[in-house]
């Protein structure tokens, strides 16, 4: 039986540096799966394009940078997401504050990477009827919280806004590394349909 793909929402502060980079990298990696990826900011620079530093790094990776505009995080956006991936702990707190029911499916990117790293197929299993694949992956990560020690340091992604290209490159390297286990698990389901 086919499983609906689901939606990922990525969150940072201004929605012009970290979250656009994560959003567009995820979209690129998940192309063809039907998984929808979007982003928002807790204090978004609404309507602004992504920062030129982020744009350059995405273009260097052959990732689409068109049709982007920063938008504010809302209850509806959070409620509609099967998984919320945030840049820093402050964004997780803000997300859960506006929609408490999202607590179990909201993770910092680096925590999520730790939780999903090394997951074997047997741990993932099949989603319950009516559950999207993305929600099932979020549920899998949540179940692993008791098994994986929480990071004490290095949870938050570097915020490069206003900084030199080297800061953007450092942020991109952090994101690229942390996306690997998430993308591997999201791509693992052969039953996903668009």
Image (cartoon, rainbow, N blue to C red):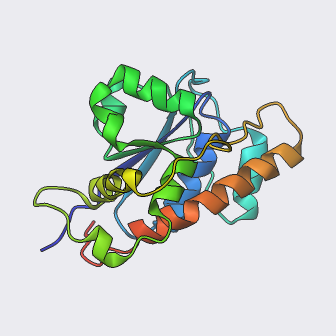
Q: Quadrant of the N terminus?
A: bottom left
Of 145 and 17, nearer the camera is 145
Of 155 and 176, nearer the camera is 155
Q: Quadrant of the C terminus?
A: bottom left
Question: What is the quadrant of residue 175 in the picture?
Answer: bottom right
Give the image location of residue 120, x and y in percent. Answer: 38, 76
Query: Looking at the picture, does residue 65 appear above or below residue 162?
Result: below
Residue 34 visible in this rendered orientation of the protein: yes
Using residue 180 as the reference point, say whether residue 30 is left or right of it.
left
Give the image location of residue 55, x and y in percent. Answer: 72, 48
Query: Looking at the picture, does residue 137 appear above or below residue 153?
Result: below
Q: Residue at x 14, y 61 (%)?
A: 128
Q: Residue at x 32, y 57 (%)?
A: 134
Of 100 and 192, nearer the camera is 100
Give the image location of residue 66, x and y in percent. Answer: 60, 50
Give the image location of residue 23, x and y in percent. Answer: 54, 49
Residue 70 visible in this rendered orientation of the protein: no
Q: Residue at x 41, y 57 (%)?
A: 147
């Amino acid at each position: 039986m086919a499983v609906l793909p689901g939606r990922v929402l990525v969150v940072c502060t201004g929605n012009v540096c970290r979250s656009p980079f994560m959003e567009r990298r995820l979209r690129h990696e998940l192309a063809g799966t039907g998984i929808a990826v979007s982003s928002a900011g807790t204090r978004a620079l609404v309507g602004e394009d992504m920062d030129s530093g982020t744009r350059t790094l995405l273009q260097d990776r052959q990732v689409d940078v068109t049709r982007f505009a920063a938008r504010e995080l809302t209850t509806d956006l959070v409620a509609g997401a099967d998984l919320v991936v945030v840049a820093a702990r402050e964004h997780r707190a803000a997300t859960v504050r506006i929609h408490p029911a999202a607590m179990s499916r909201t993770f910092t990117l680096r925590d999520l990477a730790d939780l999903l790293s090394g997951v074997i197929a047997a741990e993932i299993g099949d989603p319950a009827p009516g559950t999207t694949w993305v929600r099932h992956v979020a549920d899998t990560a949540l179940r692993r919280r008791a098994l994986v020690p929480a990071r004490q340091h290095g949870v938050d992604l570097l915020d490069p806004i206003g900084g030199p290209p080297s800061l953007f490159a450092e942020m991109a390297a952090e994101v690229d590394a942390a996306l690997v286990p998430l993308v591997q698990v999201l791509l693992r389901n052969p039953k996903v349909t668009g």
